[in-house]
Image: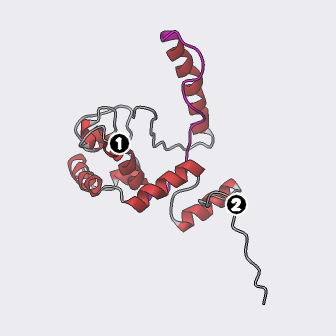
Amino acid sequence: MCNHVHLLISTENAGALAKAMRQVGQNYVSTFNRRHRRTGTLWEGRFKSCLVDSDRYLLTVYRYIELNPVRAAMVEMPEHYPWSSVHANLALRGDPLVTPHETFLALASDRTQRAEAYRLWLRDGVNDDELADIRQHIKQERALGSPRFRAMAEKTLGRSVIVRQQGRPRRQQVDES
């Protein structure tokens, strides 16, 4: 995208993503600044992240990311956007940066069938509810998934992982009868 990047990353080690993003921030920004003879920050702030449950939720996030250039009216079809994992996921070309998730691999037993199954899934698009849900979870950095997944994440993290309404809760009116 012109002003941001979406990454769907799976890691086996706690803290690995934060460490990797810190290294990207430190190394890439200093290299970029040196190359372009500039100083200061490159990004507006810390990266945003949310935990994503496997199965339907993970594939919905795949689709959300790969349809983002279409929603932004940058391209007509997701495969027209050059900097996307869609090319690997649709078996149009290999990409050493893309490692398919086991949930994606479970779509079919071979690459061609998997690409066709994903092509159909991708063409269904992201509905307005899914779009709003993903955006809220990313904005608030909450766990996106089934109630069972959210309960496990909440127990593991020791903090709430559900999306909350913004602002103060409305004051309950006392019945004066």
Label 2 to label 1, Cα distance in Å? 32 Å
Point out the stretch of residues depicted in magenta: 34-57
Q: Residue at point 70% right, 56% down?
A: 159
Q: Position of residue 12 (x, y in %)?
A: 55, 44
Taking the image as shown, residue 98 lies to the left or right of residue 36, namely left
Q: Which mark is residue 72?
A: 1
Q: Amino acid at mark 2?
A: Arg
Q: Position of residue 4 (x, y in %)?
A: 46, 35
Labelled pair 2, 1 in contact (Cβ < 8 Å): no
Q: Residue at point 42% right, 51% down?
A: 61
Q: What is the image's colouring?
A: secondary structure
Specify the principal SS of the magenta part: loop
Q: Residue at point 60% right, 37% down?
A: 18
Count neighbours of disc 2 (C-alpha within 10 A) and say few if under 14, some if 14 to 19, many if 20 or more.
Answer: few
Q: Position of residue 145 (x, y in %)?
A: 51, 60
Q: Which mark is residue 168?
A: 2
